[in-house]
Image (tube, helix red, strand yellow):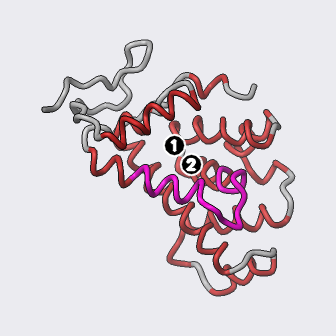
Amino acid sequence: MAKKSKKRLARGESVIALDLPSAEPTPAIAAYFAKCREKLGFVPNVLTAYAHDMAKLEAFAAFYNDLMLAPSGLSKLEREMIAVAVSADNRCFYCLTAHGAAVRQISCIPQLGELMAMNWRAAGLPPRQYAMLVFAEKITRSSAQIEERDRQALREAGFSDREIWDIAAVASFFNMSNRMASAVDMRPNDEYHAQAR
């Protein structure tokens, strides 16, 4: 049986603009939330937002974890940088806040999260990361115009074809996530604002 919606922030503001009652968590999701509380100190609101439908939440979490945490030629920081650059283009408050905090934490450079959010070109990134974000930006703004020369530019910057796939997958995932977050007015956890400052 569905529980009354608990999608509220600490200050009483809704996590999303829709009134969707939370579903009964599966054992796997209950364990996942417990792990989030243990490691992060909170459950990210994006997970709470999806908690009205356990199948969708499990699919979202599995895909996110595979893209962002599984072995890849892309570093964790590079994947978070893609998330922030794409989210900046899409003006996604949730993802800019959450993934900007991750960039600050992983890089140990507090200013980098804000630089990435405002104008990643001003961040003085190495050529490899610069090329990666040019490609992610083109996926976001004009994916139908991507040509072989765009992929070749990544190869010349040192990326393998598998890594090009991973760049495209992360950028595409965050384009979808940004649009969902904007559509339902998803709000980030307050904790993200203070992290790695």
- Horizontal and vertical percent position of residue 27: 32, 40
Residue 160, compared with residue 107, is above or below; it is: below
Nearest the eye: 196 or 25:
25
Mark 2 Cα-neighbour bin, 10 Å: few <14, some 14–19, many ≥20: many
Say whether marks 2 and 1 touch (CB < 8 Å): yes
Q: Which residue has dot 1 on it? A: 92
The image quadrant where one finds the C terminus is top right
Of helix, strand and loop, which one carries label 1?
loop
Kind of residue at badge 1: Cys
Residue 111, compared with residue 121, is above or below; it is: above
Mark 1 Cα-neighbour bin, 10 Å: few <14, some 14–19, many ≥20: many
The image quadrant where one finds the N terminus is top left
**Would you say residue 69 sits in the magenta stretch?**
yes
Q: Residue at x 80, y 75 (%)?
A: 158
Kind of residue at badge 2: Ser
Q: Please give the range of residues in magenta.
A: 60-80
Q: Residue at x 58, y 54 (%)?
A: 68
Q: Residue at x 72, y 46 (%)?
A: 116
Q: Which residue has dot 2 on it? A: 87
Residue 119, compared with residue 20, is above or below; it is: below
Nearest the eye: 38 or 158:
38
Q: CA distance from mark 2 to mark 1?
A: 5 Å
Of helix, strand and loop, which one carries label 2?
helix
Q: Is residue 91 left or right of residue 176?
A: right
- Horizontal and vertical percent position of residue 49: 35, 36
Would you identify the image quadrant in which residue 91 lies? top right
